[in-house]
Amino acid sequence: MHQHIEWDDPGEHSVMAVFSHDNAPHTQTGPGDILSARYQQHVIRVEVEAYRQDDAVSIGKVVAIIDANGQRRKQLGKLALHDYVRLPDDKRAFEPQPEDEDDNEG
């Protein structure tokens, strides 16, 4: 059984939005792939064990929960490491890039 998660809207970090304008062929998601999404403003990494093409959903286990400071956690609310989740393609998100230190200097 999998943990039901209300994923955050990926907004401008949406993987699907970026690749919707790309005509290049892409490989289909499959076992062993690591995908990212957002949940309660944290980055969640999921290792795919199965992909359901009919409803565009990856099924896998949580392998990382990362807060905004890059710190890893073992649990976030009802979600914990190694929980099985369903991750719809439209909730996949690119991970935030670390801020360049030069950008923060006055």
Image (tube, grey):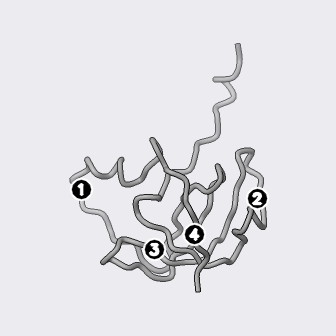
Indicate the amino acid at tag 2.
Arg
The residue that appears at 49% across and 49% down in the rendered structure is 10
Q: Circle 4 — which element?
A: strand
Q: Circle 2 — which element?
A: strand
The residue that appears at 71% across and 18% down in the rendered structure is 105
Indicate the amino acid at tag 4.
Val
Report which residue position mark 2 lands on. Answer: 72
Indicate the amino acid at tag 1.
Ala
Q: Nearer the viewer, mark 1 or mark 3?
A: 3
Report which residue position mark 1 lands on. Answer: 24
Residue 24 is drawn in which quadrant?
bottom left
Q: CA distance from mark 2 to mark 4?
A: 14 Å
Q: Residues within 10 Å of mark 2 (few under 14, many from 20)?
A: some
Q: Nearer the viewer, mark 1 or mark 2?
A: 2
Q: Is residue 70 left or right of residue 96?
A: right
Q: Circle 3 — which element?
A: strand
Report which residue position mark 3 lands on. Answer: 58
Residue 46 has which mark?
4
Q: Are marks 3 and 4 in contact (CB under 8 Å)?
A: yes
Q: Position of residue 20 (x, y in %)?
A: 28, 51
Indicate the amino acid at tag 3.
Ser
Residue 96 has which mark?
none
Q: Are marks 3 and 2 in contact (CB under 8 Å)?
A: no
Residue 89 is drawn in which quadrant?
bottom left
The residue that appears at 70% across and 13% down in the rendered structure is 106
Earlier along the polypeptide chain: callout 3 or callout 2? 3
Q: Nearer the viewer, mark 3 or mark 2?
A: 3
Q: Residues within 10 Å of mark 1 (few under 14, many from 20)?
A: few
